[in-house]
């Protein structure tokens, strides 16, 4: 009897004994990382909807002997339910599609080209990652941070390098929140004062409801036929947008952009946090991923602004090159950054609508870049 | 395929493919606007809303 009581008592406090032993050190460090993520989410409001579930998932995964990421554990079940099969990012995309008004992009469809230029950082980062010794599939997963699009990064990484999922996701969401800090110095360094004060006039409304309704169907078909491997990404975002524009399924639209997106965001964040187990996360690779992710966003901005300068020159000075910085997926932050930078040099310069067009173009561009990458890899026989 | 061949292929085809697809898409969007222009009725509905 006494023996069984002693044996039973040995189970209590075993987590603490494990945590403060030498082999528990990585978990202890990760508990501080979890605390940092929770602090950023709560106190600094850095992408709180994602960083709080990720931070708490990280905390749960690093309490020793909790076994939440073992077979049958809660975090493992969430991971298998929606990340291993790429379902969660796609469900979030339906919600994103339901939230976006592509009308401003349809007013001036050429803004889509800014959305293409804003993805060049992805491909340059791919080269850098390969140069640092990452495998081809790992390099693709790291480069996709440059899409500045959390669900796309998670979708690609969960397919090609699931062991990097925690680092890639945290880097993608953290840097996305830092767009207002990262972009302005690059924008100022690459443009002259004369370029920054270029005015672009106002956009006149020219898009009919029928065009807005047909837009998601046409985009799905065109992009799906060109890059079929990206169809799940583009198809889901356009499904959400079609529901929004058709106006007859308000309940589904609302559910997609609220309840479904919220529940999936919670599950997604927890499951990603669950992948941040100490021994797997605390590697030099993780530091390299954060460094490359930062470079990816800087290179996106450089490419966007340089493309803006080219368009400014070709158009005889009618396009403000700052608009190029908005050709990324971080919506609407990047558009606001352009507006603020433009007004810093000319208080009466209203670039917001043009920048919003480039920004929604960046949303389509980031998904398209991922779709092209996946399809090219399929063509090469790598996936 | 070695890493550099892969990287350079992905960069050229990736950047080119993304630009080409989005350019085609912008042309299709322009076409859509021409086929289904904004009518006076649409503007009126907006004003009444």
Image (tube, grey):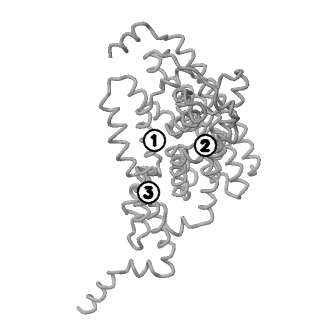
Disc 1 is attached to a residue of which chain? Answer: A
Disc sitting over residue A54 in the figure: 3
Q: Are marks 3 and 2 on the same chain?
A: yes
Look at discs 1 and 2 and give the one toward the viewer: 2
Subunit ID for the residue under disc 2: A
Residue A313 higher or lower than A51, as above or below: above
Q: Earlier in the sequence, mark 1 or mark 2?
A: 1
* Coordinates of residue A283 in the picture (x, y in percent): 59, 66
CA–CA distance between discs 1 and 2? 31 Å
Task: Decide which of A238, A315 is in the foreground and name it.
Answer: A315
Residue A184 image label:
2
| Front tag of 3 and 1 | 3
Q: Is residue A97 visible?
A: yes
Q: In this figure, what is the number of numbered marks? A: 3
Residue position for label 1: A90
Cβ atoms under marks 1 and 2 closer than 8 Å:
no
Q: Quadrant of residue A110 in the image?
A: top right
Pointer 3 and pointer 2: residues touching (CB < 8 Å)? no
**Residue displayed at 33% across by 81% down:** A11
Inspect this view and state whether residue A270 appears: no
Badge 1 element: helix
Question: Of marks 3 and 1, which one's residue comes earlier in the chain?
Answer: 3
Nearer the viewer's eye, disc 3 or disc 2? 2
């Amino acid at each position: 009897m006494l023996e069984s009581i002693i044996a039973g008592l040995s189970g209590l406090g075993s987590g603490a004994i494990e945590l403060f032993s030498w082999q528990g050190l990585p978990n202890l460090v990760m508990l501080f990382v979890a605390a940092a993520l929770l602090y950023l989410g709560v106190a600094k409001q850095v992408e709180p909807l994602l960083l709080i579930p990720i931070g708490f998932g990280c905390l749960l995964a690093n309490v020793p002997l909790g076994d939440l990421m073992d077979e049958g554990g809660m975090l493992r079940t969430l991971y298998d339910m929606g990340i291993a099969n790429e379902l969660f990012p796609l469900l979030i995309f339906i919600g994103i599609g339901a939230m976006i008004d592509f009308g401003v992009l349809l007013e001036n469809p050429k803004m889509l080209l800014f959305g293409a230029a804003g993805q060049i950082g992805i491909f340059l980062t791919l080269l850098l990652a390969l140069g640092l010794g990452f495998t081809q599939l790992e390099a693709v997963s790291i480069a996709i941070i440059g899409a500045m699009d959390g669900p796309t990064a998670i979708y690609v990484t969960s397919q090609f390098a699931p062991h990097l999922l925690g680092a890639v996701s945290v880097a993608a969401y953290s840097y996305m929140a830092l767009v207002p800090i990262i972009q302005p110095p690059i924008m100022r360094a690459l443009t002259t004062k004369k370029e920054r004060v270029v005015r672009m006039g106002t956009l006149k409304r020219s898009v009919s409801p029928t065009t807005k309704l047909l837009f998601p169907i046409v985009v799905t078909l065109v992009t799906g036929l060109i890059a079929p491997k990206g169809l799940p990404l583009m198809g889901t975002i356009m499904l959400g947008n079609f529901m929004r524009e058709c106006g007859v399924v308000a309940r589904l639209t609302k559910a997609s952009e609220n309840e479904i997106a919220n529940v999936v965001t919670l599950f997604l964040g927890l499951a990603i946090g669950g992948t941040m187990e100490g021994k797997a996360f605390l590697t030099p690779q993780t530091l390299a991923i954060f460094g490359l992710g930062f470079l990816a966003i800087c290179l996106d901005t450089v490419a966007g602004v340089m493309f803006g300068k080219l368009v400014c020159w070709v158009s005889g000075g009618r396009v403000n090159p700052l608009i190029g910085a908005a050709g990324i997926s971080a919506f609407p932050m990047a558009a606001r950054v352009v507006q603020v930078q433009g007004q810093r040099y000319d208080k009466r310069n209203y670039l917001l609508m043009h920048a919003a067009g480039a920004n929604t173009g960046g949303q389509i561009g980031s998904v398209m870049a991922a779709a092209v990458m996946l399809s090219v890899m399929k063509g090469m026989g790598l996936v | 395929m070695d890493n550099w061949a892969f990287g350079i292929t992905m960069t050229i085809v990736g950047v080119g493919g993304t630009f080409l697809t989005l350019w085609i898409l912008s042309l299709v969007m322009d076409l859509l606007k021409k086929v289904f222009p904004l009518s006076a009725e649409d503007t009126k509905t907006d004003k009444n809303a």
